[in-house]
Amino acid sequence: MQPGVNVGTEQRGLSADERRVCDEIAHAEDELVELLRALVALDTTTHAVGDPPRQEAELQEVLAERLRSRGADVRIWEPEPELVAGHPMVPDGFTFAGRPQLTARFPGSGGGRTLLLNGHIDVVSVEPLERWEHPPFAAVVADGLVHGRGACDMKGGVASMVFAAETLARLGIGLAGDLIVNTVSEEESTGAGGLVTARTLWADAAIVPEPSGLDVWVTCRGSLLPTIIVDGRAGHAGIPQRPWEQGGAVNAIEKMGLVLKAIARLREHWAGLPSHPYLSPGDCVPTMVSGGEWIVSYPASCRLDCHIEYLPEQADEHGWGSRVEREFTDWIVGKTASDPWLAAHPPRVEWLVGGVPPSEVPIDHPIVTTALGATLAVGRESTLGGLDNWHDGATLTVEAGIPAICLGPGDVRLAHTAEESVPIADLVGCAQAIAVTAMRFCA
Ligand SMILES: [Zn+2]
């Protein structure tokens, strides 16, 4: 059970029932592709608070109808906003109006473990539209790929997990534990859909088929979004200034340059910490800057926004980023204090926008060993890994104690691009791997 373990392409080590399920999925490849095409064709572009819904409800109805017809107990509902209000990830005024969440439960016969399959149905904007060779909602099939927005992030994964559950039901494969299919919105915006799942469902483990290329991702980084404000002092830009101690003007933009140097040193510090086996080091990227009031005035203030990614071992005892917040603030104030103005007027660090937590599932957890073994058994190369960015599975792991891994079709480097696509072979392999994982995990 080490990274780099690979096997060839033939299926190996499958039971007769598992082989029957895999054969059925392979034979129904066209149906799986058509399911994905139907999902891509529905515009579920994510939104800012207050924007009207797109076709989220239609998409959830398509899935609800299919899963109901296969015998699942289906719940499709718009959760009350109070269920998630006040959580650090959820902005004021947020509602689920027009964006229902879906849970479809295939009850087990009893005594087995419950497995949750969770995927998000929302996608990011298709702009700039003119960059797309294939229209983003046309779901064009070419060269063994399905093209379009959401093909890999992550309607492809949703199609594969739904198809896996449907196939088990269609073939009458009995599981001892429950198998739950759960599709949510809001992953690309607030994470509120995944939070509803964490607060209303329970399972022994979860698979989130984000585009891992069929690797098993056991961990992800968390993120924080600090804003740094540096004060200067206004004055005429064309007039020589007295020293600041005597009331002279101070250039807030130039003082922010010292903050940028401190951030660069913090990035070097984090990069020098012991490395994580599956994740990049913690990082802080300055992303937006604004400052100054008039073109002929010394700027009286400057504001810098940053994006921090941090490792699971940097998290606090609750799994969140309070320690990183303190470290960041102390570092910025401390490393700029050699400047007399900044020592007297320290940069202010604000955390106005909520962050998201990192997560990590032990590599000897049964969901990890079972999923990796199942993926290898269906003849796909697979290895352990991690996602440097956050996904809903972190919410399930941290907020609900449901260990969540990623195992999904496609290449995450195509996510959010105008070249987004997913290999059909990955869709089939993912559906097979998830079905076999469910048969073994919920046995
Ligand atoms: Zn995603």
Image (cartoon, rainbow, N blue to C red):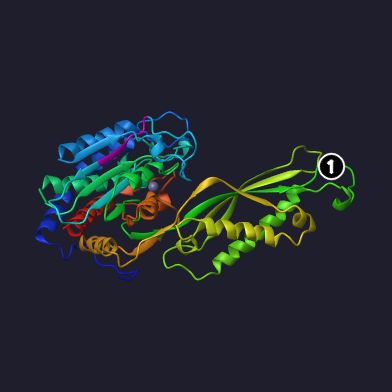
Callout 1: 10 Å neighbours few (<14), some, many (20+)? Answer: some
Seen at 29% across and 53% down, the residue is: 206
The answer to whether residue 143 is visible is: no
User: Which is more toward the observer, 196 or 273?
Assistant: 196
Any magenta on residue 91?
A: no
Q: Position of residue 161 (x, y in %)?
A: 25, 48
Residue 415, placed above or below residue 363: above
| Residue 168 horizontal side relative to residue 282, left or right | left
Image quarter in which the N terminus is found: bottom left
| Residue 429 horizontal side relative to residue 250, left or right | left
The part of the image, by quadrant, that contains residue 432 is bottom left
User: Which is more toward the observer, 65 or 357?
Assistant: 357
Query: Which amino acid type corresponds to the residue marked 1 in the rendered image?
Result: Gly
Give the labeled residue for mark 1: 235
User: Which is more toward the observer, 230 or 267?
Assistant: 230
Image quarter in which the C terminus is found: bottom left
The answer to whether residue 89 is visible is: yes
Seen at 30% across and 34% down, the residue is: 77
Number of numbered callouts drawn: 1
Range covered by the magenta-colored residues: 98-103
Q: Position of residue 352 (x, y in %)?
A: 57, 44
Residue 6, placed above or below residue 405: below
Q: Position of residue 411 (x, y in %)?
A: 37, 53
Q: Position of residue 75 (x, y in %)?
A: 25, 37
Any magenta on residue 102?
A: yes
Dot 1: element: loop
